[in-house]
Image (cartoon, grey):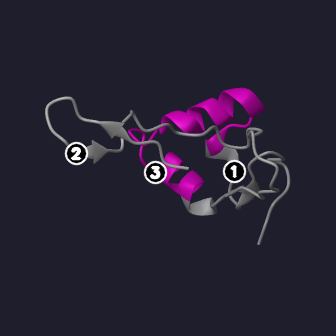
């Protein structure tokens, strides 16, 4: 459901803007749905090739799982990083 707000300077309604959020990789959500989240091998390849490529959510995944992204060479399940996926 989208919440609208009335702009105090006009007679129009708008959707309030907020900062985008980056969900944690492999983290539990507040959903009732089942999501199988994977991290592609190309992400780990880029991590190894480019020392400037360090996305915040991948750094948090690294800290939370203890898995070094530089050592992963296949696509993996985000919440079970020792499980390779095709």
Q: Quick one: label 3, few (<14), some, or many (20+) residues within 10 Å?
A: few
Q: Which residue is the extreme one toward the bottom?
A: 86
Q: Secondary structure at mark 2?
A: loop
Q: Which residue is the extreme one toward the front?
A: 11
- Give percent across and percent down for residue 22: 52, 39
Distance (Cα) linking label 1 and label 3: 13 Å
Q: Say which residue label 2 marks.
A: 12
> Which secondary structure class fits the magenta region best?
helix
Q: Say which residue label 3 marks.
A: 49
- Give percent across and percent down for residue 16: 35, 37
Q: How many marks?
A: 3
In magenta segment, residue 45:
yes
User: Is 78 left, or right, of 44 in this rendering?
Assistant: right
Distance (Cα) linking label 2 and label 3: 49 Å
**Which of 31/70 is in front?**
31
User: Is 10 left, or right, of 46 in this rendering?
Assistant: left
Q: Residue at x 51, y 47 (%)?
A: 47
Q: Say which residue label 1 marks.
A: 72
- Give percent across and percent down for residue 18: 38, 34
User: Is 66 left, or right, of 9 in this rendering?
Assistant: right
**Disc 2 + disc 1, Cβ < 8 Å:** no
């Amino acid at each position: 459901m989208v919440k609208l707000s009335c702009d105090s300077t006009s007679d129009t309604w708008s959707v309030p803007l907020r900062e985008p959020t980056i969900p944690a990789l492999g983290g539990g959500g507040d959903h009732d749905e089942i999501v199988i989240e994977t991290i592609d091998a190309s992400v780990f390849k880029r991590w190894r090739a480019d020392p400037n490529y360090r996305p915040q959510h991948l750094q948090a995944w690294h800290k939370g799982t203890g898995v070094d992204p530089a050592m992963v060479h296949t696509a993996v399940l985000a919440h079970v990083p020792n499980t390779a996926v095709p």
